[in-house]
Amino acid sequence: MQTIGESRKTVSGAAAQASAPTTVAFSKADEELQVVWGEVYAPNIPDSQGDFMTVEDVRIMMWRFMKADRLKKLDTQHSQMDNGCHIIECFQARDTDSDFIPGSWVIGVWCPDDVWRLVKSGELNGFSLDGIGVRIETALEMDIPDSMEGDTTEVAGHAHRFVVKFDADGGYLGGYTLPGGTDGHVHRIIKGAATEKTGDHSHRFSFVEGIING
């Protein structure tokens, strides 16, 4: 699922125009209401393109999106065609927020039946920001471990323990899950915020909180 907005992105490197999506996993869902919540963008954490934004940058981007009245500008898999979803909540997480990454842009999205089926199956597993920004050369220093563990969301009556790995430069290498379910199956993790499908399902997960919390 995609949101479209204008952003100011900062990255170590030459200044340039940039247009690239970055995905953050869904954090919460309400099946009865068909609403899913999640971070659109978390501050001070490099995305899949190596870019990052400050808390202030995230706030400006969010306000511009709201001011432009783009609450229905959501599509599926970057199709550029509205999918019938509607943003019903939009805020920047406070430092004391226990559900979302502090400083991140959070949205709650109502999904029509056809999109909700994809959310429940795990085929749609996060929000992907697609926008145009300006890269500004900035150094970001942070400690990223060689590997990190966590728990996936529950799908098909079970969850998995997952492990993701990083290279010496902090690049995301992917990972795997430990056996789970009644048959002891596993899932590969190649990229993004969801496992690869095994059988008829995949699982969502997030390791960003682990990096932030050290």
Image (spheres, rainbow, N blue to C red):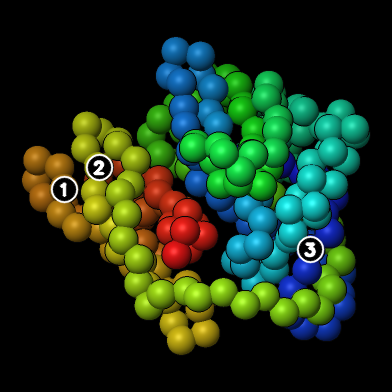
Name the amino acid, label 1.
Answer: Gly
**Between residues 86 and 83, which one lies in front from this camera angle?**
86
Q: Is residue 124 visible?
A: no
Q: Are marks 1 and 2 in contact (CB under 8 Å)?
A: yes
Q: Residue at x 30, y 37 (%)?
A: 154
Left or right for 22, reference 6 = left
Q: Are marks 3 and 2 in contact (CB under 8 Å)?
A: no
**Between residues 14 and 92, which one lies in front from this camera angle?**
92
Mark 3 vs mark 2: which is more N-terminal?
3
Quick check: 187 above or below 31? below
The image shows residue 81 at horizontal and vertical percentages of 73, 36
Q: Residue at x 30, y 49 (%)?
A: 151
Query: Can you identify the residue that label 1 sits on?
Result: 180
The image shows residue 163 at horizontal and vertical percentages of 30, 63
Q: Residue furthest front?
A: 96
Q: Are marks 3 and 1 in contact (CB under 8 Å)?
A: no
Number of numbered discs present? 3
**Between residues 9 and 116, which one lies in front from this camera angle?**
9
**Disc 3 packing (10 Å; few <14; some 14–19; many ≥20):** many
Name the amino acid, label 3.
Answer: Lys
Quick check: 51 above or below 146? above
Query: Can you identify the residue that label 2 sits on?
Result: 159
Query: Can you identify the residue that label 3 sits on?
Result: 9
